Image: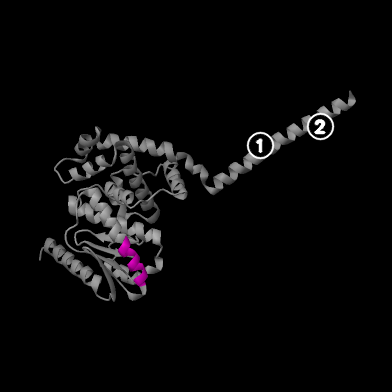
Amino acid sequence: MSNLLKISNFATFILLFIIANCELYADYFRTVNQYKIYGQEKDSSIINFLQGVVFESNAKYEKFFLYSIKGPVRIRLTSSEKEYARITSKSVPEWSSGVAFVQQKIIILKPGKYFDKTEYERLLMHEIVHIFLSEKIGIGKIPLWLNEGTAMYLSQESISWNEGIILGNAIVSGNLLSFSEMDSLLKFGQIKARIAYLESFLAVQFLINRFGEKALLNILGDFSSKLSANEIFLKNIGMDLIDFEIDWYAFVKDKYRWMVWMQFENVFWFVLVLIIIVSFISIKLRNRRTIKNWENEND
């Protein structure tokens, strides 16, 4: 048996295993249009919440992409870490909270014990974007940074203060990643992966702020053509991908480099030095006033 055939058979086995596990051992499910959400009775409140998220996000994405997903999309809320690892076949990093098997239109989410409404909403919205991008444009055609950045943008994510500090550290230490390096995102450790996600989001946000959502949509659509990434960017924003990355890099440095000083230890020493300086000036002024009072008394 050839290696290619072995790989094909293994992929088929994994596919059947994933699909089976979406419905087996699930005693509670909800349906929203072409979406089916599976899970356990104990997680019924979470599944009911996710049902609303699916309805709203699907309507939003259909309007944005001018496209409707064909066929069923299965969403599995796992009941344990063990089940999550078994269903995903350990094919995703440990730090992941969910994954979309885009070709099979299956989304797997970590157990309900991690439930936080805001995080689960963003997570599910994020994974649904990947389904839309894959079905409309094709898997593997969109650069990973653009794929992830678009998913983060459309799922309404934002950069927190702490994440700004992480970016500041990456800039100062020379650890910002290039667009091409982000293609290995799923092999990164948690910290490096977070930097890659943040950079991806900022790149898409920068693209939209400068050229508009229409430019993003046109760029994404052109990846279904035979044009190269450089040609696609040049066609839609008047600069190739390399020049865009250079401009984006300069923007990130200007905006976040100073954030490194907002770390606790840096703030502590800054405040300490400031207190010393203020105290020194205060003492000098007080001594001057004292000397002046003495002079007035002598007069």
Percent of width and height locating residue 234: 22, 34
Asked which quadrant contains residue 215, the reply is top left
Residue lying furthest right = 298
Q: Residue at x 25, y 70 (%)?
A: 22
- For the point 33% across and 51% down, the residue is 152
- Checking the image for residue 277, the label placed there is 1
For the N terminus, which image quadrant? bottom left
- Position in image of residue 199 (x %, y %): 35, 45
Answer yes or no: is residue 95 visible. Answer: no
Position of 233 with respect to 189 (left or right) is left
The answer to whether residue 264 is visible is: yes
Q: Quadrant of residue 127?
A: bottom left
Residue type at tag 1:
Ile
Q: Earlier in the sequence, mark 2 or mark 1?
A: 1
* Region in magenta: 43-52
For the C terminus, which image quadrant? top right
The Cα atoms of the two marked residues, 2 and 1, are separated by 20 Å
User: Which numbered tag is attached to residue 290?
Assistant: 2
**Left or right: where does residue 270 sit relative to residue 95?**
right
| Observer-nearest of 217 and 249 | 217
Identify which amino acid the numbered label 2 is placed on: Thr
**221 relative to 275 in the view: left or right:** left
Instruction: Look at the magenta stretch and give its main secondary structure.
Output: helix
**Closer to the observer: label 2 or label 1?**
2
Callout 2 touching callout 1 (CB < 8 Å): no
Secondary structure under tag 2 reads helix
Q: Which mark is residue 117?
A: none
